[in-house]
Structures are given as C-alpha cells and as structure tokens.
Image (cartoon, helix red, strand yellow):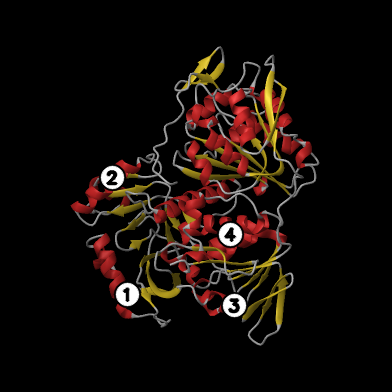
Amino acid sequence: MAKLLELIPARLQWREGVPAHGDYDDVYHSVHGALAQSRHVFLGGTGLPQAWAGRAHFAILETGFGLGGNFLATWAAWRSDPRRAQRLDFVSLEKHPLTAEDWRHVWAQGESELRPLALTLGQRLPPLVPGIHTVEFDEGRVRLFLVYHDAAAIEEIEGRFDAVYLDGFAPTKNPAMWSEPLLAAVARRMKPGARLATWCAAGEVRRRLAAAGLSVRPAPGFAGKREMTIAWREGMLAEERRPARVVVIGAGMAGANLAHALARRGVPVTLFERESAPGQGASGNLAGVLRWLPSADDNRLSRWTRAGTLAAHAMLREWEAQGIDAPWGPNGVAHLARDEAQARKQRATLERLAPPSEVLTWLDAATLSERIGWPVAQGGWWFELGGWIGPQRWCRRLLELAGPMLTLRCATAVGSIEPYAPGWRVRDAEGKVLEEADAVVLAAGAEVSSFAQAAGLPIRPARGQVSLAPAEVGSPPRVTVCRNGYVTPEVSGRRAFGATLAVDDPDPAVRASDHRENLAKLEAILPGYTAGLDFASLEARVGFRPTVPDRLPVVGPLGETPGLFILSGFGARGLAFAVPAARLAAAMLCGEPWPLERTTALAADPARFFRR
C-alpha cells in the first residue's frame, strides 16, 4: 500500500448474543441474523442472484468484510444457483480483521447454513499483513480478495464491478467508511448498469452517492427498519471482453503460472516452449528460495516479494490440503545478519513493519543454530512461511492442473509474432504460422528481448551457476539459510547452494571458479561447513535469468497494439514474483479485478522504462 499500516485485529464483544466491535461501539449485524440481513439488504438490493444469471464473470465490491457474512451468503447463493455466473470475484476491504481464534469462535455459534463455508474460509484466512490477499474456492471459480487496510485503500483497488455492498458500522460510529471521497471512489468503480445496496438510510449518504453520479432511491429496510438505500449507475450491465484464446511463449515459472491462471478462468491457452519439456531454462534448478525481502520503508520490491511469498505459500498449502503433491519444503527460511550492524537494521525493520510473528520474526544466534542444525555467529530474520520450492516440478504440476484448457507444444521455437485483425499471429523461424490468437504473452525469460516488440526493454540475461552437493536426509542445514547467498536442506539426495550472477555472460559451461565462489558463500553462511565437502563430488547447473535495473518484474501490455503482453524480468526472485505476476497478467487480459494494489502492480508496468 501507499503507507505502512499495523493491522490491529477486531476487538470482539457480544451484545445479547450479537457480535460487536468494541472500538466502534456497534454490532456487526442485526439481532435477526447475518444471513437474513445479507439476503434482504445486499443480495436483494443488488438484484442477485438474477443479475449474474448466464454470465461468464461477476464481480462484487464490498466496503467492510467484518465477520464475512455477506461474502458467505453470496457464496452460498452462487453455489445453489444453477444459472450462476461461471466465475465470481468478491473484493472486500477490512481494517480490523478477526483473528483466526475469534473467527472460529464466531462461526462455531453462527448461522448453521453458513457454518460449513465459514469453517472452510477460516482454514484459509490470510495472516494479518497489509495488502490484497487472494483466497480461491471451488477450483478457482470463486475468488475472495481480502484487502487488509483502511478505507483509503479503495484507491488501490483496480477493477470494474457489477455490484457493490456498501457496508460498515454506522456513519456516526465510523465516518471514514461513508465519506464523500470513499463513496466517489466506489462509484467510479461501478460499471454502467451496476447496482449498489446498503442498509444505511442516512440522507447525507444518499446525497453523496447522488453527487458521485449515481441514481438513488429508498427501499424497504430489513427487520423493522423502515428504509435502506439502493443506488445504480445508469446504463446496461455488460461483461468485459475476454480473449477467446491466448498464446503464451515460454513454459518456465512465468509461463506455467500464467497458463494455470488463465485455464482456471476458462480461457484456452496454447503454450509454446522451445525446449523438449517445461521448466528447462532458469526454472530448471533443483530448488530455490521462497521468502520475502523486507525493507524499513516497505518499498516496491518488499511489497512484491511479500505478496508473492504469501500467494505461493497459500497455493501450495491448498494443493497439500487437496492431496496434490506440492514440490516444496515449507520448513522456514533463516536470513542471517552479516554482522551486528546489520542485525540492528534487521531488528529496526521488524519493529517498523510490525508483521505477525508467523510471517516474520527475529531470532538470536542460539535459536537459529538449533533450527539450522549448525552453529552460526549471528541472529537474523526467520520467515516461518518460507521454504524451498523445486521450480521445474512446480511448472509441471501447474501445467497438469491446467487440464484440457491447455495445449502444450514443446520443442517448438517461436521465431516472430505479428499483429493481424483481430489479434496476433505466431510464426516459427522459417515463417510458418504456428497459431493465431486474440492475445500473445511473452514469458520466455531472458529470451523475450529477441522479439522485435520487446527489444527496447532493458531485460538482460544474467548467468547463474548453482552448485549441488550430495546430502543425506536430516543432515544440516535442516532449513534453508540465506546470507549473501543461500543453501537448502536435502532435496532428493542433494542440496543446492550459491549462486553466482554475471550479467551478459553467455557461457553455458560449468566453471570450477564458480564452484569456488559458491563454496566461499556457503562457508560464510555456515562457518566450517565446507571442510566436509569433496570438491570432486560437486555438480552444478547453469541458467540465465532475465534481469532489469530496478529488480522488479515486467508485467503488462507491451506497445500500442492491443493484445500483446509481457511477463518477464523475474531475476533472482522468480519464486516470489511468479504467482502474483501471472495472476495480474491474467486479470489484465480478462478485464477482472487486479490481485495486487494499483501502485504495487504499476511498479511492474513495462511502460516505466519508456517514461524516463
């Protein structure tokens, strides 16, 4: 977000059996029940479920998530409706989320009809970290975007909505949720024909909605309340145009995540990969590190890597819950301080950001030594949700899960792309047409610069050599450890460490000098460790990463001709960038709400290089 925010959980109270928020001196819903209120005020007031009948996609914006009752009622209505929209997006703001314990307590005695859905959501609630958190249900057909921030975050939500639930505590108790700027921002995000509903009947709220360009009228209130308010934007509700087919070039982490994201949206994808199998380029390493890169000012790189770490963690945890083999080791990541000066900076950053301990904490040298299984001289950050991921296996699993919506064409090199009415034509090196599609996404890592349309971008290949040593199960280090390099625990009988980085070095051969550089990094991480390694037993892998000067990904439309996108520039942070970057590209292609805050997302806009 635009500023730091320490999330303070809701101070839950009970009044005659109804949950209330102590700080706002107001109840979350009527004594007549959350479900009945949601059905009358919000679903009924926005014309649901009739409004989504036969639609491919329907998007709802809510200004106060609270106990989640409105989302749960909407999800339940969607599930029970045979004419429902194919996909439902629900974006909801919340400054004071419930803790997981309070959530369970509320819904253990809440509406019995909603309880199973509430308990399912309760197992997936994101940690109390500012930002937009995506939680997917029903094989990705229902997506909840939880925006943990204050009311000002409305300006960070990018999307056009079919319905709005204007909710929140009473204007006299929580005026920020009913302010003129917030209501104007809500109105700007409503499509022509979109409807808004609120239980509030205050004249000032109605006047502000009208001033924002909406038509407004009263409607019968709920459970003895004389009136509520309905508003709408004049016009006919229409769907955003989505591509009938998308071509993705490159089957590494970027392309595989994008193919998976588009397939879950029902968009057919043809994925071209010049190698004989997916994940052969920079995504072909044994294991890489998944963790956040905190900064005291919560800069763009910090926000991107935090969002990506949480998103990848949530995805892989959900796979495990479904019995899907997840190629990772979620056993945490230690980032050791180099010296006492850096240790002080790490602690100061932690104090400023104030994340929950289950996301990031600082541990002393003794505690980290015990977790690592090897003595270290300095303490450091501990990322409880971090770990290692096998990127090649991750790519393959994503493509398997894309199912019949994906056509994978390996050993097929794309030579050029060209616009044609109404989309794009893809050719091989000899000029033969391989595919025609509405949109093309360049996701070929460092090779995207070989396409004329991307030649002006400062994406440069960086050679990296990762060293591999034999390892026994349970041998130290037992967790992934970073300090100007990294070393993983045992993965399939080996451990990875390194890595080197050399921009514009095209040599694909394994070098003994790079092994020595990686060994020096390993020794600095775990003093005395390299004495037990046999140099002759080391293996290595060389890959080429797509790097850019500001170390941020490159995601978005490319050039002036519609339908051409790029997804690249991941550099050394591919595991942390891949999920949100791919979801962002998919949302842009399909005209859906963005899964990242607007300022964070636009930090990756390829146009940033041409504005300088």
Which residue position holds label 3? 274
The answer to which of marks 3 and 4 sits earlier in the sequence is 3
The crowding category of the residue bearing disc 4, from other C-alpha atoms within 10 Å (few below 14, some 14 to 19, many at least 20), is many
Instruction: Decide: few, some or many residues near mark 1? Use Cα within 10 Å; few <14, some 14-19, many ≥20.
Output: many
Residue type of the residue flagged with mark 2: Leu
Point out the tag, 1 or 2, that comes first from the N-terminus. Answer: 2
Quadrant assignment for the C terminus: bottom left
Label pair 1/2, CB-CB below 8 angstroms: no
Residue 222 vs 568, above or below: the answer is above
Q: Distance from label 1 to label 2 (Cα)?
A: 30 Å
Name the residue carrying label 1: 515
Q: CA distance from mark 3 to mark 4?
A: 22 Å
Q: Nearer the viewer, mark 3 or mark 4?
A: 4
Q: Looking at the image, which is closer to me, 554 or 384?
A: 554
The picture places residue 277, in percent across and down from the top left corner, at: 59, 72
Q: Position of residue 18 (x, y in %)?
A: 57, 17
Q: Position of residue 579 (x, y in %)?
A: 53, 56
**611 sits left or right of 200 in the view:** left
Q: Earlier in the sequence, mark 2 or mark 4?
A: 2
Q: Nearer the viewer, mark 1 or mark 3?
A: 3
Against 558, residue 403 (above or below) is above
In the image, what residue type sits under mark 1?
Answer: His
Residue that carries the numbered disc 2 in the rendered image: 363
Q: Which mark is residue 585?
A: 4
Q: Looking at the image, is mark 1 or mark 2 nearer the viewer?
A: 2
- Say whether disc 4 or disc 1 marks the residue closer to the N-terminus: 1
Q: Nearer the viewer, residue 17 or 204?
A: 204
